[in-house]
């Protein structure tokens, strides 16, 4: 099964590899005798090694779902704030919330991209063969991913060009396009993230 761990998580690795590779698991009754000597068990350290191992072997819950949720909520908030403040808890929420929602949208997109790369790598080393991964591989090509990333990138550039156009119409004087600028920056960064991640995913196939 190509096992690698050397600590308390070794048993967990065997179970996880068996489940992912759809091997048959049976229970064999044994006689367990009382340990003779001092136990080397460390509750916190060994528990953390188990948790760390299981998280690293579960990109869906470590990367994909957190990334999807964080990105979706943040980008929706950014687009909504583009049309005016949100009134909640008897006060308006505006530009400062949009700055943070933009930051979290980029962070969520990056986490999502890392999750896709982790899923591809897991399949490359024969650790996982899920139907979702196979379905993604059936539709993913470098050219499609690059087109998608470039589309997002140029959408951000178009917004930036719109800001410059408005600025030029005002004889390059006072400019109040902060929200549009934030959304433009967000789309440009997300587009570039997608482009570079596309090459990484193509290498992991």
Image (cartoon, rainbow, N blue to C red):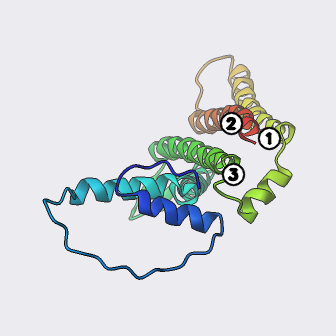
Q: Nearer the viewer, mark 3 or mark 2?
A: 3
Please identify the quadrant where the N terminus is shown.
Answer: bottom right
Quadrant of the image occupied by residue 131: bottom right
Q: Earlier in the sequence, mark 2 or mark 1?
A: 1
Q: Earlier in the sequence, mark 1 or mark 3?
A: 3
Q: Nearer the viewer, mark 1 or mark 3?
A: 3
Comparing 161 with 149, the one in front is: 149
Give the residue displayed 66% in from the left and 69% down from the top: 22
Residue beneath disc 1: 145
Comparing 130 with 37, the one in front is: 37
Please identify the quadrant where the C terminus is shown.
Answer: top right
Comparing 155 with 178, the one in front is: 155
Give the residue displayed 15% in from the left and 65% down from the top: 36
Q: Secondary structure at mark 2?
A: helix
Calculate the distance from the C-alpha at mark 2 to the C-alpha at mark 1. 9 Å
Give the residue displayed 86% in from the left and 37% down from the top: 143
- Mark 3 burial class by Cα count in 10 Å: few <14, some 14-19, many 20+: some
Residue 146 position, x and y percent, is 80, 35
Q: Is residue 74 left or right of residue 22?
A: left
Residue beneath disc 3: 123
Q: Secondary structure at mark 3?
A: helix
Q: Is residue 10 left or right of residue 198?
A: left
Which labelled disc corresponds to residue 155? none
Residue beneath disc 2: 197
Give the residue displayed 50% in from the left and 62% down from the top: 14
Depicted 125 relative to depicted 91: above or below:
above
Calculate the distance from the C-alpha at mark 3 to the C-alpha at mark 2. 17 Å
Q: Is residue 51 left or right of residue 42?
A: right
Residue 31 position, x and y percent, is 32, 80
Q: Earlier in the sequence, mark 3 or mark 2?
A: 3
Residue 127 position, x and y percent, is 63, 55
Please say if the residues under marks 2 and 1 sit with CB atoms less than 8 Å apart: yes
């Amino acid at each position: 099964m190509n096992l690698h761990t050397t600590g308390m998580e070794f048993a967990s690795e065997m179970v996880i590899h068996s489940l992912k590779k759809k091997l048959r698991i049976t229970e064999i009754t044994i006689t367990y005798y009382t340990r003779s000597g001092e136990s080397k068990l460390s509750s916190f350290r060994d528990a953390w090694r188990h948790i760390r191992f299981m998280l690293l072997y579960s990109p869906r819950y470590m990367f994909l779902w957190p990334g999807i949720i964080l990105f979706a909520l943040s980008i929706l908030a950014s687009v909504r704030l583009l049309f005016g403040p949100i009134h909640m808890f008897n006060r308006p929420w505006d530009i400062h919330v949009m700055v943070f929602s933009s930051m979290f949208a980029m962070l969520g997109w990056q986490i999502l991209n890392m999750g896709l790369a982790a899923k591809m790598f897991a399949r490359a080393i024969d650790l996982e063969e899920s139907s979702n991964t196979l379905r993604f591989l059936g539709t993913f090509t470098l050219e499609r991913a690059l087109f998608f990333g470039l589309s997002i990138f140029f959408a951000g550039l178009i917004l930036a060009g719109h800001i410059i156009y408005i600025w030029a119409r005002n004889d390059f004087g006072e400019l109040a396009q902060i929200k549009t600028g934030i959304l433009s920056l967000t789309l440009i960064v997300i587009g570039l993230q997608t482009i570079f991640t596309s090459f990484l995913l193509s290498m992991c196939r």
